[in-house]
Amino acid sequence: MTADTRVAVITGAASGIGRALAVHYAKHGVRSVIGTFPGDPHDPEETLRLVKDAGGQAVIHEVDVRSTPSVDAFAERAVNEFGRLDYAVANAGVLRNSSLGEMTDERWDDMLDVDLTGVLRTLRAGSAQMTEGGAMVAVSSIAGGVYGWEEHAHYAAAKAGVLGLIRSVAAELGPRGIRANAVIPGLIETPQSLDPVNSLGPEGLQRAGRDIPWGRVGRPEEVASVIGFLTSDDAAYVTGQSVTVDGGLTIKMRA
């Protein structure tokens, strides 16, 4: 099986890491189903344009990872459109700040429904359509995956949960020849991290970048290339792992 026969579904592909991954796949002959949430302000047509400019094939599909029927239909779209499904990437997520004192049950549940249970739905739906040789990747975060983050306990809990989910899924699906891994992005310049209300914002990212050994925050393409590796045959013996992509942030002792 060559790369140009393979098909991926990517949630949250209207911008950021998801968009960069769709373009990365296009450059390597992998066809994509571009998952986009109807309420997302970013234009999935721009992702599709970039894919086509890179010589790739893709279709846009609206998906709400809070809904099992919606996610199931998303995975089925790959088979209906391209005849198969090989890679499933659970990238969709939301970021909201809330102190512990203001953390209502609703805020907690809404966050986990997207950022953790949404990952489960994506992996479950993807695995149902895959045959041997499939690969799945879930996007965690340095917040929760490595560090705690004040006023983001629900987000960090969800992202930490993704790592346990991936290890368990990898153990379960290994006998079927399906691999599952996670990436833990550090500080990456995406629309989510550029949000000054719920995340660091442009100025906060610039300040933080000075403390990173690599000297700057990361780019979506730098995470996408790692996801591309993890789903490729080059990572054929890698499963149940979590790869941190952070420019060295987590290995530097702060004075």
Image (cartoon, rainbow, N blue to C red):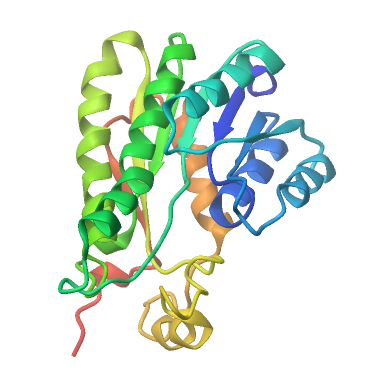
Q: Position of residue 138 (x, y in %)?
A: 39, 40
The vertical placement of 70 against 111, above or below, is above
Residue shown at 43%/56% (left/top)?
A: 94
Residue shown at 47%/45% (left/top)?
A: 91
Depth check: give the residue in front, 84 or 109. Answer: 109
Q: Position of residue 30 (x, y in %)?
A: 66, 29
- Residue 128 visible in this rendered orientation of the protein: yes
The vertical placement of 182 against 180, above or below, is below
**Residue with the most extreme left position:** 101
Depth check: give the residue in front, 82 or 228. Answer: 82
The vertical placement of 95 against 121, above or below, is below
Depth check: give the residue in front, 24 or 109. Answer: 109
Residue shown at 44%/36% (left/top)?
A: 230
67 vs 194, left or right, is left
- For residue 171, what is the image quadrant? top left
Which quadrant, please, contains the C terminus?
bottom left
- For residue 103, what is the image quadrant? bottom left
Which quadrant, please, contains the N terminus?
top right
